[in-house]
Image: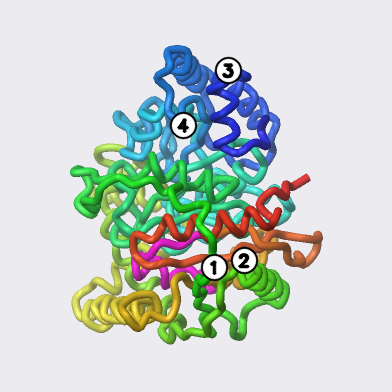
Amino acid sequence: MHKLTLKELSAQLQARKISATELATLFLDRIEASDLNAFLHVDRALTLAQAQAADARLAGNEAGPLTGIPIAHKDIFVTRNWRTTAGSRMLQDYVSPFDATVVEQFNAAGTVTLGKLNCDEFAMGSSNENSFYGPVKNPWDKTAIPGGSSGGSAAAVAARLAPAATATDTGGSIRQPASLCGVTGIKPTYGSVSRYGMIAFASSLDQGGPIAKTAEDCGLLLNAMTGFDERDSTSLQRPKEDFTRSLNQSLQGLRIGVPKEFFGAGLAADVEAAVRGALVEFEKLGATLVDISLPKTELSIPVYYVIAPAEASSNLSRFDGVRYGHRAADYKDLADMYKKSRAEGFGDEVKRRILVGSYVLSHGYYDAYYLQAQKIRRLIAQDFQSALAGPDRQCDVIMGPVSPTVAWDLGDKTDDPVANYLADIFTLSTSLAGLPGMSIPCGFGQGEKNGKRPVGLQIIGNYFDEARLLNVAHQFQQATDWHLREPA
């Protein structure tokens, strides 16, 4: 039962072949037996109470497609009655008095919460090694990182501890862990999913999205997650849509842009081989490959690591030990309390980004760094529009690798933050432009020590083109079985 897709689980629940309570119990038992450190908070009583409510809806024929489906939430979404830590000591015992909009939407759809998932502290990281509660292990190889910051979400779905999970993507934090753990994840267009109740890292970049087994599952989850929210000033006023409506369309005539910048130096040979093999498969499905250029790709790393830390330094200023969060036990005065509370509450990577962000926003440096980065950000977005939009557009979607390598070993890059940053080279530009992008499993590469590790294919589309991306991914998954492979 734990191997079924959301659509298959929904059919089982609707046919009364299994109850929501039985299904939740099955996954709770799997979580309890796991040693991946993917979950930070599990409460069997809370979960089973939600499952019983879902069973009542099913019995009363009031169920929707997600009623009774177990789901886990990244610990960046605040949840009433559950701890929400953002992977930080700063919020170690925090219990929110309200639910994030995303959590509200899933509760309204009748899903059953399995628990809260581990993540890099305040979503800052590419390996899930920055969590105060310890790193998550990759279920394909427990000596490897799962990717980040949504490593707990990707690992939980890959290990079948949950059939689906929420996640967030600021610079690739849905796509990269989905790639490294061999599951499917999609970051929708910026503003499509409400950020209300999502603990902020970089407000102009953060976007929620789902991680699941298949593209079809992700479409079902997006149907629930998206929609206008007046409580979020960046939420887009667009009508609800069915993201699964185009899944079965033929790919005949689809033009796939292949950026030369995504296949240069730094891309591991095993990753390139898997991605090239996927592109050949798309040609068999009727698509045409088109060589394109995204010349500003290499600038995405310096631009992102100016803008994101700047916004983080502003957002995290609220954690001062006064109203909520960690407060130092011993201090002399108010200023000393601020300093000690923040020094004790934040981890090294968060402190590093706060310092960088405060520097680039300071008097005399704002124009030279932050303002310049915002200008280049617009040029990066224009590169994508030249390829994807207008009467002279070159392609319908863009494809390439998600990560330049397969998952690396735990501890390999902990002493070299820049090496971690460089791992985001293929995902950052999409986030900076606010475009939708997704990762689907497309093969395996060779880990340095312990055998095969998953490789993901990145699919990027124009604004609000999620239905097309899901159609493209679904057709590939109907023709291949990479998404069905499971860790031992």
In this picture, is 472 found above or below 373? above
* Residue 344 percent coordinates (x, y): 42, 48
What residue did someone put label 1 on? Answer: 252
What residue did someone put label 3 on? Answer: 16
Q: Does the CB distance between marks 3 and 2 fall below 8 Å?
A: no
Q: Which circle's residue, 4 or 2, is located before the other in the chain?
A: 4
* Residue 321 percent coordinates (x, y): 30, 42
Q: Does the CB distance between marks 1 and 2 fall below 8 Å?
A: yes
Q: CA distance from mark 4 to mark 1?
A: 30 Å
Left or right: 189 with respect to 26? left
* Residue 226 percent coordinates (x, y): 34, 46
Specify whether residue 211 is painted magenta.
no
Q: Which circle's residue, 4 or 1, is located before the other in the chain?
A: 4
Q: Nearer the viewer, mark 4 or mark 2?
A: 2
* Residue situated in front as seen by the camera: 196 or 323: 196
Q: CA distance from mark 4 to mark 3?
A: 14 Å
Q: Which circle's residue, 3 or 2, is located before the other in the chain?
A: 3
Q: Residues within 10 Å of mark 1 (few under 14, many from 20)?
A: few
What residue did someone put label 4 on? Answer: 65
Q: CA distance from mark 1 to mark 2?
A: 7 Å
Q: Residues within 10 Å of mark 2 (few under 14, many from 20)?
A: some
Kindly identify the residue that appears in the image at 35 percent across and 73 percent down: 306
* Amino acid at pointer 2: Leu
Instruction: Report if residue 310 is visible in the image.
Output: yes
Q: Nearer the viewer, mark 3 or mark 1?
A: 1
* Amino acid at pointer 4: Pro
Q: Does the CB distance between marks 4 and 2 fall below 8 Å?
A: no
* Amino acid at pointer 1: Gln
